[in-house]
Image: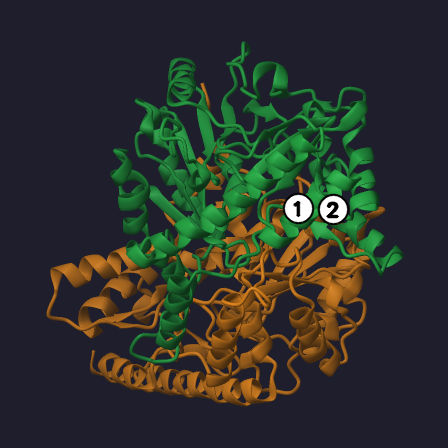
Chain colours: A green, B orange
Amino acid sequence: MFKANGDYLKLRGSYLFSTVARKQEEYRKAHPDKELIRLSIGDVTQPLAPAIIEALHKAVDEMADPETFKGYAPDLGYSFLREAAAENDYKARGCDISPDEIFISDGAKGDCGNIQEIFSKDSKIAVCDPVYPVYVDTNVMAGRTGTFDEVNGLWSDVIYMPCTKENDFMPELPKEVPDVIYLCFPNNPTGGVISKERLQEWVDYANKNGSVIIYDAAYEAYISNPAVPHSIYECEGARTCAIEIHSFSKNAGFTGVRLGYTVVPKDLKSGDVLLHSLWARRHGTKYNGAPYIIQRAGEAVYSEEGKKQLKEQVAYYMKNAACILKGVREAGFEAFGGVDAPYIWMKTPDNMTSWDFFDLLLDKANVVGTPGSGFGPSGEHYFRLTAFGSYENTVRAIERIKAM
Amino acid sequence: MFKANGDYLKLRGSYLFSTVARKQEEYRKAHPDKELIRLSIGDVTQPLAPAIIEALHKAVDEMADPETFKGYAPDLGYSFLREAAAENDYKARGCDISPDEIFISDGAKGDCGNIQEIFSKDSKIAVCDPVYPVYVDTNVMAGRTGTFDEVNGLWSDVIYMPCTKENDFMPELPKEVPDVIYLCFPNNPTGGVISKERLQEWVDYANKNGSVIIYDAAYEAYISNPAVPHSIYECEGARTCAIEIHSFSKNAGFTGVRLGYTVVPKDLKSGDVLLHSLWARRHGTKYNGAPYIIQRAGEAVYSEEGKKQLKEQVAYYMKNAACILKGVREAGFEAFGGVDAPYIWMKTPDNMTSWDFFDLLLDKANVVGTPGSGFGPSGEHYFRLTAFGSYENTVRAIERIKAM
């Protein structure tokens, strides 16, 4: 008799954002007259930039003509996109990353979830707490996390690095050495950023101890402070210890378009084994490339027009972030992030639990946010709001929160 | 020190089609004057049908407008596409599959590779031999296949079901009961098909023995014989033992567009555990939905215009298949398939190895095919040609083969 994967059964409840969506839907059904404003999931609301729309139409037309029709894409992505990413995201920042170290995919979430596959089953992972749930959940599904402690909300075989206001939301170098360290800056959910000096300490730690860092750079486009690094490869020695994951969802509004990439430098080795070869093999065996028309849209992100238009789009969302940060502070909340990141991380009032505050905000302000405890136990008593709404809705949400 | 996944290191050589592409490229560089015709990888060559192009343009325009812009898609796919698939691919054929049992994805290859994840690590798999390499390779990567025997070319913990001309390319019900059985009809690579009666025997076997069948129906659009089932759910009892994987690559030319779906009926259980819930959880955690514009293209596949245009496209490729089958037989080869499937499976001459014949065909006819042994040891001394070229190239390839 076939059996289900027992590691899947260890997962806690459902995926955080599915639960948020379900509770939101239940409320909507019970109160059809109320108009909800969603500042919960990190989903963009602004339309695609004109340069991207133009590139999509052009690529669609190519698919209509036998002379220019494209079948299977190259396993690892089209050269035009890999070269544009290498040039703009790395060379322009003084990072030594070549196009053939860039693997195009259908998005950062999948890459974040799949990357653990290339590591040994007994690898010990370290994550920030709170953390984007995908890093932990996919390691639970792979059987790497031990048992779940219902009391403290932690997995027995995971190294947690608490990030709270007490340590300025900055993880400390772990005493027990992990094999794989997940870092995300600008951070989801706290909106914190890391300086180049602090990131260099992580790179040095990883190189010294034989750890590998999975660096999730999904929000790098939101950095305005010139002292904050956009890529881990700005640090010396990162080529021998770091994988970087990049999204087009947040910098270019591609949440519903689906495009991302992962950088695996060829200097990153376990003994004689290049992680680059393993990731290439995974792509070749379990994946068939991102759609041609979408890779052309990605290329347009790097065009002069595209860059100009997307700078405006990012500025639009950061205006929302500033509005939220100012607004919730004026409403009396303690709040963090929101300066170099599209997330505002606020303390719940009166030590209220995150989910109680979720219900309160939903009921009293008709605003949907994300409970901090959904990101890990150290996220309890915190709450995340995102800057990805429309400006009008963001302003109205803040007015409602102030009036609560 | 971090370690690589040792199961990945067990993989044999590189992915079959990557090797074919590399050898083809080496030949091209060594003989720049020769014009190669590729009848190797199952990649389509005809442009997208007008109804699909129109749907793509329309969806792109929606992404340009804040009123109609779409962010993250629903985890499991948009209702419009799931409903169209349920109606056209199932209800119209008398199969009882509801839209919420259909999981939209970015293609059948990924689903074929990922589906093994929801089963226990000690599951025993059974595959046809020869077989689409993805089924076996992804189980190797999951550590399920034991050790590889260099002499017979088999994995110690896999149940192989040889399919040769001696048994009419039809697998026999395995004596040792597998947990998971991979079946693909119309078959890749042999081009064989299964009757409803024979398929019912598999469903009965699986239900009786507690096996689950992964039914890869990627080529169902090529069936012309009305006695051949398009879906395993045409068989009684399949809802309790079968998962079906569907591609848009071959019926609609989506190899470079990327769209597919997997059906997991809610009656399919391991004890109390619904496989539907596990697959939903995988989607929610490791995947973020197929692009909106591409799901709209998928919807157009089921429109009246789309169906008409795609029927012509399939007929175009089946004309190629008939041309190849007739041609290679006239050239003196024994050949199979090509009637209800886009693949022609031929015997190599004089018991030549598949790779030797690959080199011969490449060198003497400048035609690229796929060596049968790449699909498994029982594929040795066979060779696969595909019907997905242009008609002109297919005719020229056959002329060259005849002139060899």
Q: In the rendering, at what x and y percent does residue A115 appear? A: 50, 38
- Quarter of the image for residue B362 reads bottom left
Q: Are marks 1 and 2 on the same chain?
A: yes
The reply to whether discs 1 and 2 touch (Cβ–Cβ < 8 Å) is: yes
User: Would you place residue B151 above or below residue A269 in this image?
Assistant: below
Q: Is residue B90 left or right of residue A89?
A: right
Q: Nearer the viewer, residue A134 or B243?
A: A134
Can residue B142 be spotted in the picture? no
| The C terminus of chain B: image quadrant | bottom left
Three-letter amino acid code at the position of disc 2: Val
Q: CA distance from mark 1 to mark 2?
A: 7 Å
- Mark 1: secondary structure: loop
Q: In the rendering, at what x and y percent does residue A195 appear? A: 42, 23
Q: Nearer the viewer, residue B364 or B216?
A: B216
Q: Nearer the viewer, residue A212 or B160?
A: A212
Residue at 35% across, 52% down: A307
Residue at 56% across, 23% down: A126
Instruction: Name which of mark 1 and mark 2 comes first in the sequence.
Output: 1
Q: Chain for mark 1? A: A
User: Would you place residue B65 above or below residue B126 in this image?
Assistant: below
The count of marks equals 2
Q: Residue furthest top?
A: A175
Can residue B199 be spotted in the picture? yes
Q: In the rendering, at what x and y percent does residue A251 appear? A: 45, 48
Q: Is residue B157 left or right of residue A9?
A: left
The residue pinned by badge 2 equals A367
| The N terminus of chain B: image quadrant | top left
Q: Is residue A339 left or right of residue A356?
A: left
- Mark 2: secondary structure: strand
Residue at 76% across, 75% down: B95
The residue pinned by badge 1 equals A39
Q: In the rendering, at what x and y percent does residue B113 appear? A: 55, 52
